[in-house]
Image (tube, helix red, strand yellow):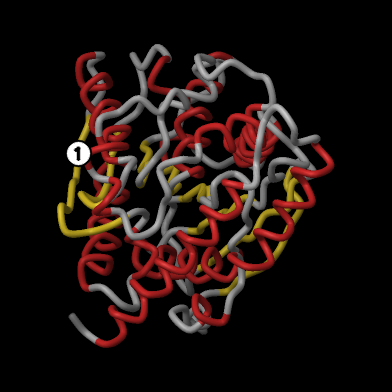
Amino acid sequence: MLLSQWFMYNAFGNMKRSFQRGFDSYDPLLTTVDKAIERTRSLRAHVDFTQTMRSFFRNPPQEIKQEKHLKNGVRTLISTPPIPNDRVVLYVHGGAFVLGLMNIQMDFAAQLSKASHAIVWSVDYRLAPEYPFPAGLEDVFAVYKSMLSEGVNPNKITLVGESAGGNLLLGLLLKIKQEKVPLPGAAIPISALTDFNMTGESYETREHLDPMLPVDRKKTLHFSYLRGESPDNPLASPLLGDLAGLPPLFIMVGGREILHSDSINFAEKANKAGVDVTLDVDEKMFHAYPLFYNTFDEAKLAIGKMSLFIQMKT
């Protein structure tokens, strides 16, 4: 293992312990919304922009132009390569629905734009617990509709999102179907949470392999994000929805993560529903690993695979 990779895993361990301390402090029977907000802000202060994590992300490539806009009232970062093609990516970041990791988001969006030669719209959606479900999903849907109203061909749009962003991405596809809006040309969910019931076997069988996510977070996410909404709502748990008619999917997941089953189960159900599904599992890698392309060759390869899929399907 390279020294940079050792430091990365050490940073993951610190982040996992910070998450666990924050999750342990929640008790749905005792915690008020105000206390949840206070504790989440404390968690953000310790996890979001630590110097340890910053050191692994460079400034976005200089050739990528990045500008902040309001799209249907939602803050959106648009990354544009020097010579863009006609493809557009809608990128939805992760962060357990409560964190906005903009330092990582800007870097990854720029790298994806550079690799795919596509314009990338990154949604700065509202976060829980201040804004629980379905606020984030509504923001992502608003930005998608803004794309269409500005004349972007839906067949040229690819949705990309990791972790919580992957959940919102898949929920968005079901929302688009529900509202009878034209579907995008393709989607790439990465390490997505697909079922808030969290009953997949990997929560037990792979917890010891996961360097990032603590397994005991169910009650926290239910309280901070769902806030009384049923985990069986397909817009929150896309695995439980009607998947027929979805666009081509490139589902990426690592073998060393508790959300492994979420991706496997979604891929199997989508395939049975007749969806064009490509499942890409890297057994050596961890949660949302394509974001860490500066450190791991597997992550660089993943971005290349994503770019190729975008070119093939849109």
Residue visible at 67% across and 46% down in the picture? 125
| Residue 285 point in image, percent of width and height | 23, 59
Q: For this view, does 53 lie left or right of residue 279?
A: right
Which residue is denoted by mark 1 in the rendering? Answer: 279
Residue visible at 32% across and 43% down in the picture? 258
Q: Is residue 203 above or below residue 5?
A: above
State the residue lying farthest toward the bottom: 3
Residue 149 visible in image: no
Q: Residues within 10 Å of mark 1 (few under 14, many from 20)?
A: some
Decide which of 297, 34 is in the foreground and name it: 34
Residue 307 visible in image: yes
State the residue lying farthest toward the right: 34
Which of the 4 image quadrants contains residue 139?
Answer: top right
Q: For this view, does 61 lie left or right of residue 181?
A: left
| Residue 161 point in image, percent of width and height | 45, 47
Q: Is residue 238 above or below residue 303?
A: above
Q: For this view, does 76 lie left or right of residue 295?
A: right
Question: What amino acid is found at the position of numbered circle 1 in the picture?
Answer: Leu
Decide which of 89, 11 is in the foreground and name it: 11
- The quadrant of the image that shows the C terminus is top left
Residue visible at 45% across and 64% down in the picture? 84
| Residue 223 point in image, percent of width and height | 65, 31
Residue visible at 24% across and 52% down in the picture? 256
Which of the 4 image quadrants contains residue 35?
Answer: top right
